[in-house]
Image (cartoon, rainbow, N blue to C red):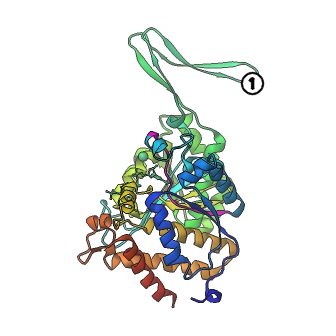
Amino acid sequence: MAETEKIQMTTPLVEMDGDEMTRIIWKMIKDILIRPYVDLKTEYYDLGLKHRNETDDRVTLDSAKATQKYGVAVKCATITPNAQRMTEYNLKEMWKSPNGTIRAILDGTVFRKPILVKGIVPYIPTWTKPITIARHAYGDIYKNTELKVPKGSKAELVVTDENGKETRALIHDFKTSDGIIQGVHNMDNSISSFARACFNYALDAKEDLWFASKDTISKTYDHRFKDIFAEIYENEYKSKFEAAGIEYFYTLIDDVIARVIRSEGGFIWACKNYDGDVMSDMLATAFGSLGLMTSVLVSPDGVYEYEAAHGTVTRHYYNYLKGEKTSTNPIATIFAWSGAFRKRAEMDNLPALADYADKLEKASIQTMEDGIMDKNLAAVSKLENKQPVDTETFLNEINKRLAALMK
Ligand code: NAP
Ligand code: MG
C-alpha cells in the first residue's frame, strides 16, 4: 500500500518489546503483517532483559505508566530472571518479573482465552466455544505466613486494631500432636478491583460471568468474596448486564467444576488465586496448545495490556542463534497485536483499524485451517493436509491471506 493509503492511527499503542525468540517474531510481525497496512504509531519501550538491566528496571515502570496514560499496550514475552540468567546476562540484580510489576501498577486482572481452530480438538469434546479464565492475582496462600507448631502449643489468630485493642480466635490447641498453621489474607479493595475487572471484561466480550468459591465452609473469608461480587454487581453492573443480555452467576467451586466440564464454553470464569493457578493450566492443556493461548491484563479503570500467554520460547531461540530455521508459532503474539488494535480502534473510533484487526485474525486462522502451522501445532492437529513450516514461511502464508482480505 502507498503510505497515504495506509490505515491511520490517532493515539499511539504502548509497545513493550521483549526477549529471545518472541523478540525475533515481534519484529517479523511488524515488518510482514503490520507495517504494509497500518501507519503504525507506538510509544516504544524495550523490556528486553539487557535494557531492563541497563535502566535498573526503570523501563518497566515507565512502560506501565505510559499504559495508564494511553490506555492500551501490547507486550512481547519477557525473561523473568533466575540464577542462570544472572550469569547469562551479567545482571546487576535479579530483576522482578515485568508482568508482576506491570500488574501491580495497573492493579489488573489477567484474562486468558484460547484461540479455537479446526483440527485442534479440545480434550472435552463439548467445548465448542472458548472458555476465558480470570485469576485474582493477589493474596491468599501466595502471601501467606506459615509455622510448624510443636505438640503442647496453642495457636491463635490475633488482630490488633489501631488503638491497640486485640481480638483473638483459637486456631487449634495442639495437645496431642505436632502440626502446622497458615495465615492468609486478602483485602476488600483488591477483591473489588478483581470483581470490576471481571464485570467490565464480561460486558466487553458480551459473555456470561461465572464466579465460585467455598463460602459454605469458609463463612467469613470466602463469603467476603461472594458478598463483594454481589454488592458490586447489584450497584454498578446489573442493569448493564441485563441490557447486554448476559448473566452473572455465582456458585460453589466444586459445582462450577462440574458445570465447566459439561458446558459448551463461551463464558468467563473468574477464579480465586489458587483456583486460577491450577485451573488455567488445566484449561490451557485441555484446549490443546500453549501457542494458541492469548492473555490480556485489564485494570478496574479500563486499561488493557495484551500479550501471548507463552514465554520467550528459549530452546527455539538458541537454535536460531546457531543459524537454524525455527518453527515457532507466532499466532498468540499476532492476536496480542490484533487485540490491542481493536481496543485502540474502539477507544478512538477508527473502524478501518478495527476491520484490519478482524482480518488479521481471520487470515491467521485461515492459514492454520489450510494446514499451514508450526511443528508443535502440527504434532497435535487432526487435519489430514497439515504441513509444518518454519516461522517466516508461516508469517508469509498469513500475509498472503491477509493481503487478499485487505483488497
Ligand atoms: P515457553 O517460552 O512458553 O516455552 C515452553 C515450551 O513450549 C517451548 O520450549 C516450546 O516447546 C513450547 N512453546 C511455547 N510457545 C511456543 C510457540 N509460540 N511456538 C512453538 N512452541 C512453543 O516457557 P518456558 O520455557 O518455561 O520459559 C522461557 C522463558 O520465558 C523464561 O525465561 C520465562 O521467564 C519466560 N516467560 C515469560 C512469560 C511472559 O512474559 N508472559 C510467560 C512465561 C514464561 P518445544 O521446546 O518442545 O518446541
Ligand atoms: Mg499454574
Closer to the camera in the image, 233 or 352: 352
Q: Residue at x 54, y 69 (%)?
A: 337
- Which residue sits furthest left? 384
- The image position of residue 331, as x and y in percent, is 43, 68
Residue 231 makes an appearance in the image: no
Q: Main SS type for the magenta part?
A: loop
Residue 396 visible here: yes
Location of residue 201 by image quarter: bottom right
* Residue visible at 40% across and 45% down in the picture: 254
Give the magenta-colored segment's residue range. Answer: 71-83
Of the four image quadrants, the one with ligand 1 is: bottom left
Residue at image coords 34%, 77%: 369
For this rendering, which residue is in front, 20 or 8? 20
Instruction: Please state if 355 lies on the left or on the right of 178 as rendered.
Output: right
Reply above or below: 286 against 85: below
User: Within the image, what quadrant is residue 245 found in?
Assistant: bottom right
- Residue at the image position 37 percent from the left and 68 percent from the top: 128
Question: Which amino acid does the dot numbered 1 rest on?
Answer: Glu
Residue 355, how many percent across, how many down? Answer: 56, 81
Across and down, in percent, residue 121 comes to 30, 66
For numbered disc 1, what is the local secondary structure? loop
Q: Is residue 242 above or below residue 92?
A: below
Residue 235 appears left or right of 291: right
Q: Which residue is mark 1?
A: 162
- The answer to whether 322 appears left or right of 44 in the picture is left
Badge 1: residue crowd in 10 Å (few <14, some 14–19, many ≥20)? few
